[in-house]
Image (cartoon, grey):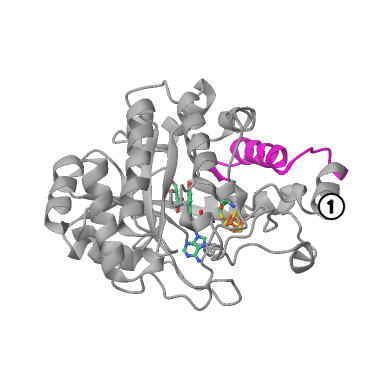
């Protein structure tokens, strides 16, 4: 499988592998859901003074990232905390917002207007109205499908207490993005009780949505890593063979033109083997902020990522949070104002202007 999927990637993508220089902005850790694997979520008590990051805190991180050459502001946050916690509702109401997604829209606009970073919102499930409100400030957004497996939301499953992880609801959000012509990131989380057959079914569902709307800009194949203090703390991490198999399956199902991503920080020091299986992207890598979803897993230094990528025979290139094919030759995936901003950050090839030299070596 790896031989076939690697060859398919070479055919469609050549020997270029990308990453997105980003800052991670955890707007809130509070969440109405409970996923068995998640260490990101916090109760208001655990969150203490920082129920939400303030607009000032958001801008400080974004501006610090801008100085380091970052082009993406990744907003990852808990799902509708105001539906579970009165503290969250009060915090928002006090500042004139009816929901977390309204507040997210406000800070996305701030970042777009006051920095050169492009927001990429990953806030969980969204309605059409919520997504349409975010669209003018987000050249792309994302939501992991995770898995279509029904076992996972049954008794004892990872998603038993996470209504937003019902595959129907997730698929509907991804479909809405297609209807709005919004470049979209999704993916599968493997090793949470899913079988290989489940992964094939999940990937086929993603493929079908992309066939209808052509908006799935990338597919993340993410491996579960057990976290202390979570319901699944004593489960085994997804192992290398399962991830290798899943990446190859993703490439073979999604085809030569798909962008397939594996995050390099979740695989210790052997992450380069996923290049063999057909990936062409490492996702967001930050010189500034940690991966708040996997806080124990530091990103490789960009020097190291470049070395490993080149040693395997590939060229490493920085990209924007939206892929070149969605803005280089067509304008139909973005409002005009956003399109202008995106194009100004890109070079002729659609990757970050200035290239990898901006991030490694003597700068
Ligand atoms: O650092 C992380 N970035 C995550 N990202 C961001 C990713 O690394 C890149 O920044 C995007 O792919 C940009 O295109 C996600 C983006 C999504 O749209 C959906 C899910 C994720 C998940 C993670 C994650 O767990 N950790
Ligand atoms: C932001 C994304 O991070 C993923 N995610 C959440 N918790 C974990 C974990 N323990 N290990 C790996 N990935 C995780 C989910 O897929 C979520 O959608
Ligand atoms: C911190 S997890 C990522 C965002 C959202 N809560 C989700 O699970 O989709
Ligand atoms: S993974 Fe997302 S939805 Fe699930 S508990 Fe964590 S923050 Fe909430």
Q: Quadrant of residue 33?
A: bottom right
Q: Is residue 278 above or below residue 48?
A: above
> What range of the chain is rendered magenta?
94-122
Is 117 covered by the magenta stretch?
Answer: yes
Rendered location of residue 125, percent (x, y): 58, 42
- Check if residue 259 falls in the magenta segment: no
Q: How many marks?
A: 1
What x and y, as percent, mark residue 303? 33, 66
- In this view, the residue in front, 315 or 359, is 315
Say if residue 321 shows up in the picture: no
Q: Nearer the viewer, residue 337 or 269?
A: 269
- SS for tag 1? helix
What residue is at 76 percent from the left and 52 percent from the top? 84
Res. 35 image quadrant: bottom right
Looking at the image, which is closer to me, 198 or 49? 198
Name which residue lies at 32% across and 64% down. Answer: 305
Task: Please give the name of the residue rendered at 22% of the width and 40% of the height, measured from the top-left corner.
Answer: 255
Most foreground residue, 97 or 284: 97
Residue 143 against residue 159 in the figure, above or below? above
Residue 228 visible within the image: yes
Quadrant into which the N terminus falls: bottom left
Image: 290 above or below 148:
below
- Identified at 25% across, 44% down, the residue is 253
Q: Residue 362's x, y, as percent?
A: 36, 62
Relative image position of residue 193 (x, y in whole percent): 43, 64
Q: Which residue has dot 1 on it?
A: 86
């Amino acid at each position: 499988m790896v031989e076939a999927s690697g060859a398919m990637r070479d055919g469609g993508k050549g020997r270029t592998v990308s990453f997105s220089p980003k800052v991670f902005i955890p707007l809130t850790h509070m969440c109405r859901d409970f996923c068995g694997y998640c260490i990101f979520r916090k109760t208001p008590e655990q969150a203490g003074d920082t129920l939400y990051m303030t607009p000032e805190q958001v801008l400080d991180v974004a501006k610090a990232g801008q100085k380091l050459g970052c082009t993406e502001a990744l907003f990852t946050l808990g799902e509708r905390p105001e539906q579970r916690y009165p503290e969250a509702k009060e915090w928002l109401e006090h500042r004139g917002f009816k929901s977390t997604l309204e507040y997210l829209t406000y800070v996305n606009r701030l970042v777009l207007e006051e920095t050169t970073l492009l927001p990429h919102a990953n806030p969980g499930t969204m309605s059409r109205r919520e997504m349409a409100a975010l669209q003018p400030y987000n050249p792309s957004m994302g939501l992991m499908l995770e898995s279509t497996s029904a076992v996972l939301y049954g008794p004892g499953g990872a998603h038993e207490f996470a209504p937003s992880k019902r595959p129907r609801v997730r698929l509907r959000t991804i479909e809405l993005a297609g209807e709005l012509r919004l470049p979209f990131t999704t993916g599968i989380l493997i090793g949470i009780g899913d079988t290989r057959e489940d992964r094939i079914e999940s990937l086929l569902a993603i493929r079908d949505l992309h066939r209808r709307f052509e908006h799935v800009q990338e597919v993340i194949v993410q491996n579960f890593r057990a976290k202390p203090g979570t319901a699944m703390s004593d489960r085994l991490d997804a192992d290398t063979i399962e991830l290798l198999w899943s990446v190859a399956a993703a490439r073979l199902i999604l085809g030569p033109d798909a962008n397939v991503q594996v995050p390099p920080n979740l695989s210790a020091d052997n992450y380069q083997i996923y290049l063999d299986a057909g990936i062409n992207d490492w996702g967001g890598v930050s010189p500034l902020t940690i991966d708040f979803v996997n806080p124990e897993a530091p990103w490789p230094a960009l020097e190291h990522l470049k070395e490993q990528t080149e040693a395997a025979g590939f060229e490493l290139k920085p990209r924007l949070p939206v892929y070149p094919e969605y803005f280089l030759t067509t304008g139909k995936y973005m409002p005009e104002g956003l399109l202008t901003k995106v194009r100004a950050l890109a070079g002729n090839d659609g990757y970050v202007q200035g290239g990898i030299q901006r991030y490694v070596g003597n700068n």
